[in-house]
Image (cartoon, helix red, strand yellow):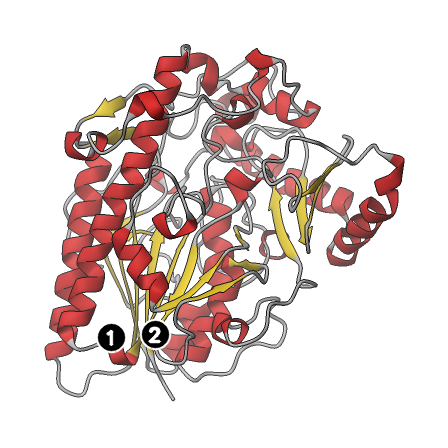
Amino acid sequence: MTFNTLILLTDEQDAHALGCAGHPVVKTPHLDALAARGTRFTQAHTPSPICVPARAALATGRWVHDIGYWDNAMGYDGRVAGWGHALQAAGHGVESIGKLHYVHAAAPTGFSEQHEPLHLADGIGQVWGSVRNPLPNTPRPSRLFSELGAGLSSYNRYDISSAERAAQWLHDKAAEKEAAPWTLFVGFVAPHFPLVVPQRYVDQIDVHAIADPRLHPLSGYRRHPWVQRHADFSNADDELGTPERRRLALACYYALACFIDEQIGKVLQALGQSGLQASTRVIMSSDHGDNQGVRGMWNKSTLYREATHIPLILAGPGVPSGKVCATHANLIDIAPTVLDNANLPTDPNLPGRSLVAIANEKDDPQRIGFSEYHAVGSPSAAYLVRQGQWAYHHYVGYEPELFDMAADPGQAVDLAAHDGYRPIREHMASLLHQMLDPVATDQRAKADQDALIARFGGREAALGKGPAGASPVPPRQPSV
């Protein structure tokens, strides 16, 4: 059978920032209801803990090291065909509303229409972030918290508009006679910084009840040297400055998760009211997580659970209801899922599998979880390998980390240097080497970034290219 697909993608949302995941503060009744009528994947990972590479991997169903969209200056441009192209070739309608974060709207990225898309600033993104061979020694201000607290940001307005437009799109689609099968991608910005959200959402959070972030260096925690190098390059936590501002930042992040649930609720309500729910499979996820002050780190760009672990909910015809699936899943699994929904063949070379199939199977403890990072603030490539209870972090040029996620879900105790865990560490390293050559991949990423820097006039010129913060929302514009 053929089903429509509705993809709902938030930005920078930790998998635990859901009511149905047991978060003590975040309330997400609409996503909780979606999970209740579908399957929630509790071990879902981003292919890369930064926006643009993760989104390119989602679009193509391929790993970042396979497609070469390494960082936030290398937006997806359709050079590597993805599920959108396959759907278009089959006469399947493919549209987007809201944030995509590809190179620009004119690129052939697999959409027949893009409604008010948000793409890379000026089509080039953070060129300065590609300067990492070597990483500059001069610290760079993060500016993550130049805005913080109650208010109404341009991103809030954009998300509200995207939700309303998506709801109207569904009603209009339901009114069409003999409509072709369709896929609609709705991209939201929250809970991505700036951590600004309307007052009524902040009022739902008791900021005084929020605990200080765990494993903070001020409390004696020592960061891994690779992570410390990242913090030395841009230390957002120092810019926050006080425990009170850290708690306020967390409160606003949680409030944004509540805010975006409400926007998603508008879309899901329209899906039900339109009569399209019975013929539509819904995929909800996020491009990556957020460190939320743990280890004194904010934003994404690390391999720890907070940054790499994402929400993933699948609901609709043929999907088990009320199921919680612990099989490792990834954004690259969305491509074969969308093709499966459309009753189209999947390229056998794609590394992912249909989430519908995974949801209907018993949990598979042997399936590999994977993520990689080659972008801003990193002195070298970093790779996450998950299997069963183990999380292995491989840093090129640095010692690895190994965590027992069953006994130590907060990743407070690194076991990599303990002789008793050597067989596990070596097994996890062998899984990584079966996928790629870590050093050669690092060299290839840096060579591509060096070539990009050269096109912009060299290191010093490149350090001044690109937005200081996040990509701005687009001006009001017609569909393209």
In the image: residue 333, left or right of residue 349: left
Q: Residues within 10 Å of mark 2 (few under 14, many from 20)?
A: many
Residue 379, labelled with which disc?
Answer: none
Can residue 194 be seen by looking at this rendering?
no
Helix, strand, or loop for circle 1?
Answer: helix
Can residue 128 be seen by looking at this rendering?
yes
Q: Is residue 265 above or below residue 3?
A: above
Q: Are the residues tagged 1 and 2 within 8 Å (C-beta)? A: yes
Residue at 21% in and 56% down: 265
Residue wearing tag 1: 277
| Towards the viewer: 416 or 135 | 416
Disc 2 marks a residue whose amino acid type is Gly
The x and y percentages for residue 227 are 63, 26
* The C terminus sits in image quarter: bottom left
Residue wearing tag 2: 316
In the image: residue 153, left or right of residue 447: left
Residue at 62% in and 66% down: 351
Q: Is residue 395 above or below residue 93?
A: above
| Towards the viewer: 94 or 398 | 398
Q: Earlier in the sequence, mark 1 or mark 2?
A: 1
Q: Quadrant of residue 303?
A: top right
